[in-house]
Image (spheres, rainbow, N blue to C red):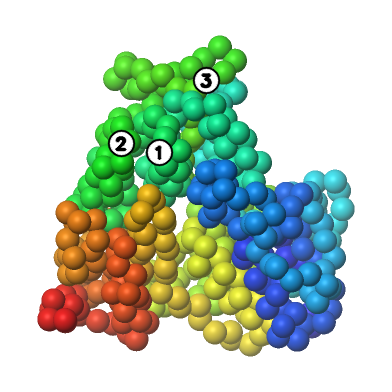
């Protein structure tokens, strides 16, 4: 397939890395970058930390410090893709423009989940964009009572930032412990204890029945009938892949855009970032990752797959890596871990909040989680990259160090 026109839909991290890779590896045809937001590509992790804390402004979020001139892009900012036609090989934008393509990179990311039947009250937010973060930060200057719904990474970072500003913070988590489905009850309890150490009112195993107020949020009603007074509510209950515009396109959609192990979703169509679901041959399982490192690496891999044309392409087989900064603790996870894995603490102790836990399944090492132990943690990413490792052997090796 000859590539003379490539469209990249999604102007965030994965899309940017894709266009950079296309140019740097020799593609010299038309290259269109479509983004729903008005901004040039920017970094999202600081939105729940430095921007929310009032320490950074939007100008400090740029993902690319140098000018974009070398990429020779045909920009379509503040333009939403609304349809894809694989037959005519066109992307339709919300204003009716049709963009023809030989190659397409789908990188439209994800959208925050919202609580059902929540009225449009001032002071209730999800956190995904610069505008979201700046609006919340402005309200935090008034020293509000903050309620965070959801104790995943976004909710936990928001809570930590608000506590660092000296605010009263309540975190509501429907599960028995934070991240219990991902890291299990023991590590989940430790992550919860970190927040309680810093004065957060963390309530687990509770559900939100309603968010109430007269034009502005005033309280959160729980499913047991109790209420919590609130001036600001941040809902952080996960995201859904932004694939609505792809319905009926012919691409396979199943909690994301389904790709083969090379990121190919259809002839001449690849996907990258939050919405890409593919089988990672390193772990032999279907994955969809919502993390910064994956968006970077998969954007590159998807662009290279597009350039390979009718060739077989290289499998995308990363060792996943995610981190979260909360208070003075750096939480890092490598590999593919679940709440059902075997878990062993091999460095440090949970009591001192500085440790590394190894995760194993069916006798094999699957990953590791570290709290403020980056040097020890990263050796396990290298170990996983080298190939299958016995869980017991990894534990024994760590304890012999």
Q: Percent from the top left, x then y, of residue 360?
A: 22, 69
Residue 163, disc: 1
Residue 123, disc: none
* Depicted 103 relative to depicted 168: above or below: below
Quarter residue 305 falls in: bottom right
Residues 362 and 369: in front is 369
Residue 361 visible in the current orientation: no
Q: CA distance from mark 2 to mark 1?
A: 7 Å
* Depicted 302 relative to depicted 196: above or below: below
Say which element carries label 3.
strand
* Depicted 401 relative to depicted 64: above or below: below
Quarter residue 105 falls in: bottom right
Residue 199, disc: 2
Say which element carries label 2.
loop
Return the disc, 3 or 1, that comes first in the chain's sequence.
1
Return the disc, 2 or 3, that comes first in the chain's sequence.
2
**Image point 23% across, 63% down: which residue?**
355
**Image point 77% across, 82% down: which residue?**
27
**Number of numbered discs visible in the structure rendering:** 3
**Image point 72% across, 83% down: which residue?**
24
Q: Residues within 10 Å of mark 3 (few under 14, many from 20)?
A: many
Q: Percent from the top left, x then y, of residue 29?
A: 84, 78
* Residue 87 as seen in the image, left or right of residue 223: right
Which quadrant of the rendered structure holds the C terminus? bottom left
Residue 217, disc: 3
Q: Are marks 2 and 1 in contact (CB under 8 Å)?
A: yes
Quarter residue 300 falls in: bottom right
């Amino acid at each position: 397939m000859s590539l003379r026109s490539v469209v990249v839909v999604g102007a965030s991290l994965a899309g940017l890395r894709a266009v950079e890779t296309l140019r740097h590896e020799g593609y010299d045809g038309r290259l269109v970058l479509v983004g729903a937001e008005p901004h040039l590509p920017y970094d999202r992790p600081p939105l729940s930390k430095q921007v929310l804390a009032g320490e950074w402004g939007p100008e400090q979020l740029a993902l690319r410090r140098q000018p974009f001139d070398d990429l020779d892009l045909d920009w379509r900012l503040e333009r939403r893709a609304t349809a894809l036609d694989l037959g005519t090989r066109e992307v339709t934008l919300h204003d009716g423009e049709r963009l023809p393509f030989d190659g397409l990179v789908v990188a439209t990311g994800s959208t925050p989940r919202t609580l059902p039947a929540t009225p449009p009250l001032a002071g209730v937010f999800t956190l995904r964009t610069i505008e979201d973060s700046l609006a919340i930060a402005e309200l935090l200057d008034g020293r509000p009572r903050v309620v965070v719904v959801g104790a995943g990474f976004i909710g936990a970072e928001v809570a930590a930032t608000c506590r660092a500003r000296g605010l009263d913070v309540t975190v509501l988590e429907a599960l028995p412990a934070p991240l219990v489905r991902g890291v299990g009850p023991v590590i989940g309890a430790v992550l919860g204890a970190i927040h309680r150490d810093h004065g957060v009112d963390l309530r687990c195993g509770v559900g939100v029945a309603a968010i109430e107020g007269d034009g502005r949020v005033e309280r959160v009603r729980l499913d047991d009938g109790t209420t919590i007074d609130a001036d600001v509510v941040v809902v952080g209950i996960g995201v859904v892949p932004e694939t609505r515009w792809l319905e009926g396109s012919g691409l396979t959609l199943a909690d994301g855009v389904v790709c083969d192990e090379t990121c190919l979703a259809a002839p001449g169509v690849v996907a990258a970032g939050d919405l890409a679901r593919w089988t990672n041959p390193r772990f032999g399982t279907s994955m969809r990752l919502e993390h910064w490192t994956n968006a970077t690496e998969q954007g590159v891999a998807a662009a290279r797959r597009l350039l390979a044309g009718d060739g077989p392409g290289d499998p995308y087989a990363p060792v996943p890596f995610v981190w979260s900064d909360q208070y003075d603790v750096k939480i890092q996870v490598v590999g593919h871990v679940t709440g059902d894995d075997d878990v062993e603490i091999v460095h440090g102790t949970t009591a001192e909040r500085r440790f590394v836990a190894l995760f194993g399944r069916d006798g094999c090492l699957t990953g590791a989680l570290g709290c403020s132990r980056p040097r020890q943690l990263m050796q396990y990413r290298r170990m996983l990259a080298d190939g299958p490792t016995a869980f017991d052997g990894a534990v024994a090796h760590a304890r012999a160090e």
